[in-house]
Amino acid sequence: MKYLVMIQGTQAEYEGMRGKVSPGAPAWSEEDVQAMYAFMGALNEDLSKAGELVDGQGLAEPARARSVLLGEDGKPVVTDGAPDATAVTLAGYWVLDCDSLDRVTEIAERILQCPGPEGMAVHPVVIRPILDGAADM
């Protein structure tokens, strides 16, 4: 079965990765950033070798997002950027093809071991099964 595995973050945390301290988001050193990339690279390599990795991507910071919704008049309203630097949003994802929910849960537990600076926020790793047609509904 395929699963969407999501990691979360805030605009302030992205800024912390560039060395800027914010409330609730410590500054990352270059060594912290390199350790995180090395960890994620090794994880992706292991998932690929196991035949479980379908896709995986980190996402640009929320400040580079765009939201489109319908206004009260029924016309689209477009908003650029992060409305709130402390709002938790999708930071990256994997699409995994795993034999069981237990296996994908093991992977999520490994993701939580990603290194970072002292005091960094730890958000839940969210697992969602990907529906495979009307039979899954």
Image (cartoon, grey):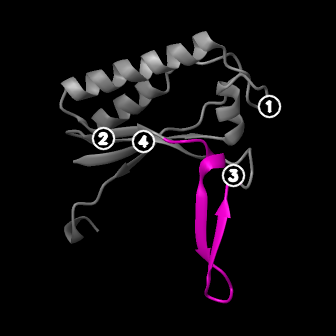
The residue indicated by pointer 3 is: 82
Mark pair 1, 2: CA separation: 31 Å
The residue indicated by pointer 2 is: 55
Q: Which quadrant would the C terminus be assigned to in this image?
A: bottom left
Residue 93's disc number:
4
Graded by Cα atoms within 10 Å as few (under 14), some (14 to 19) or many (20 or more), the crowding at tag 4 reads some
Give the residue displayed 58% in from the left and 69% down from the top.
68
| Left/right of residue 57 with respect to residue 85 in the rendered view | left
- The percent coordinates of residue 23 (x first, y second) are 81, 32
Q: Does 129 appear above or below 52?
A: below
Secondary-structure class at tag 2 = strand
- The percent coordinates of residue 49 (x first, y second) are 20, 24
CB contact under 8 Å: marks 4 and 2? yes
Question: Which of 101/9 is in front?
Answer: 9
The region drawn magenta spans 59-82
Mark pair 4, 2: CA separation: 8 Å
Between disc 4 and disc 2, whose residue precedes? 2
Q: Quadrant of residue 96?
A: top left
Give the residue displayed 64% in from the left and 69% down from the top.
78
> As shown in the figure, which amino acid type bears the numbered disc 3?
Ala
The residue indicated by pointer 1 is: 22
Question: Which of 63/88 is in front?
Answer: 63
As drawn, the residue found furthest toward the right would be 23
Mark pair 1, 3: CA separation: 15 Å
